[in-house]
Image (cartoon, rainbow, N blue to C red):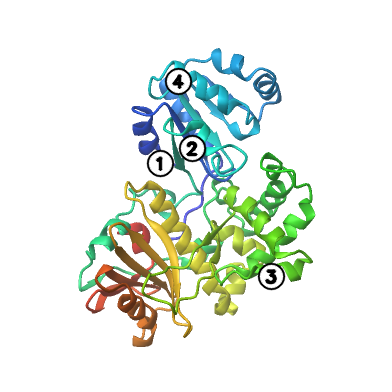
Amino acid sequence: MRHPTLQAGEFVNRHAEARVRVALTDTRIVALVGPRQSGKTTLARRIAEHDGRPFITLDDEQSRRFADDDPAGFIRSLGKAVIDEVQRSPELILALKRAVDEDPRPGRFLLTGSVDLFKGSISPDSLAGRVESIELLPLSQAEIAGLAPSGFLARAFAGDFPGFQQTGPTTDLVERVVSGGFPEALSRPAPARRRAWLRSYVRSVASRDILDLSSVRKSIELTRLVDHAAVSAGGLLNLSSLGSRLGLDSKTVDRWLVLLEHLFLIRRVRAWHHREMKRLVKAPKLYFLDSGLLAMLLRADAVRLAADRKMLGPLLECFVHGELAKAVALSDETTAISHYRDKDGVEVDLVLERSPGAVVGIETKAAVTVRPRDFRGLKRLGQSAGDSFVCGILLHGGDRIQQVAPRLFAMPLKMLWEA
């Protein structure tokens, strides 16, 4: 089956909708957060129409002026409501706190925000105990295909995979990677038009959305930082090296990367650590949350990747990280994502960890065939984690699930969304 595109204006059922609706039954404020154009407004409007709630967007200048001039009056006029892009009027947060303290009924407000609302200029203490924050990232592969939420995480932490099973190959893998998950980009069937939209998206984030978080006004420098970060994606983050290429000190680079994280463009994945292991590298890795966006920045389309398969590695890592991040956002179990690398250079792309002490390793390979040496990192992680190690999984481009050793599996990449 060819990787699907979307029709312009087509509604895609979002797996987060059920989670939002449950949260509205027992929580005073629910915040739907994620990158701009990930589908938050569409989902929030759908819920508003179904529940008969007023829908107010602070992208509307008149509404934003009212909210800025009289936050308490703006909130007082509402019973239950949806407030879209709430980060555009930070003063509303204290008014919301007062309103839900006076009237603590659950489900009073559904907020959306294109910044991580509680890691930027808005204090997390302002709404402590009153809000549940739910991430809505770009479309997952399961959502694009109209499938139910994947059971991959649950099966991985149970080690619940067959010893051998023919599943068929992962179709159109490169196309999936370079397309990413932004609905608006996927509605453009021509790859060149998709890339044009993604290019405009980055410029918009650097020139407009960053103003919602800080006093940074240097959109050109921020755009350059995004470009250079793309080259570093999938690798260990070296702030000094990145800064030297931009003529910036490492503290400035760090501060600006934090802003890009709050806007859901990138994510720094910490190094996995164990209290008894002193030979582990501590540097984080840098990932883009959307592989299509990264592919555009690297000028890596399907034709170029067919000619140069080495370019596919970092893109595929970001793609897998993005799918896992979307699955983690839907899970009731708190799941940390990290990476493993020791002083010998032995590494595992991603490490998933749940309390109490359950560890799963994920290694990614685009090739169809796997070899014993491909499991070197997973074996080393298993030795380091000891009894906490549930299993190691090598995701590949082949067509079968196979257990190659106790607690070690190889399986097609599509199991991320078809498990």
On residue 16, the disc is 1
| Secondary structure of residue under mark 1 | helix
N-terminal of the two: label 4 or label 1?
1
How far is disc 4 from disc 2 in space, using C-alphas? Answer: 21 Å
N-terminal of the two: label 4 or label 2?
2
Q: Can you tell which of label 3 and label 1 is closer to the viewer?
A: 3
Q: Give amino acid for label 2.
A: Leu
How far is disc 2 from disc 3 in space, using C-alphas? Answer: 35 Å
Please report contact status of discs 4 and 2: CB closer than 8 Å, yes or no: no
Residue at label 3?
240
Q: Give amino acid for label 3.
A: Ser
Number of residues whose C-alpha sits closer than 10 Å to that of mark 2, classed few (under 14), some (14–19) or many (20 or more): many
Please report contact status of discs 4 and 1: CB closer than 8 Å, yes or no: no
Q: Can you tell which of label 4 and label 1 is closer to the viewer?
A: 4
Residue 70 lies, in percent from the top left, at 66, 17
Q: In this view, does 276 lie to the left or right of 118?
A: left
Please report contact status of discs 3 and 1: CB closer than 8 Å, yes or no: no
Residue at label 2?
32
Residue 13 lies, in percent from the top left, at 41, 40
How far is disc 3 from disc 4 in space, using C-alphas? Answer: 46 Å
N-terminal of the two: label 2 or label 3?
2
How far is disc 4 from disc 1 in space, using C-alphas? Answer: 27 Å
Rendered-image quadrant of the C terminus: bottom left
Q: Can you tell which of label 4 and label 2 is closer to the viewer?
A: 4
Q: Give amino acid for label 1.
A: Ala
Q: In this view, does 248 lie to the left or right of 29?
A: right
* Nearest the eye: 186 or 314: 314
Please report contact status of discs 1 and 2: CB closer than 8 Å, yes or no: yes
Q: In this view, does 321 lie to the left or right of 256?
A: left
Label tally: 4
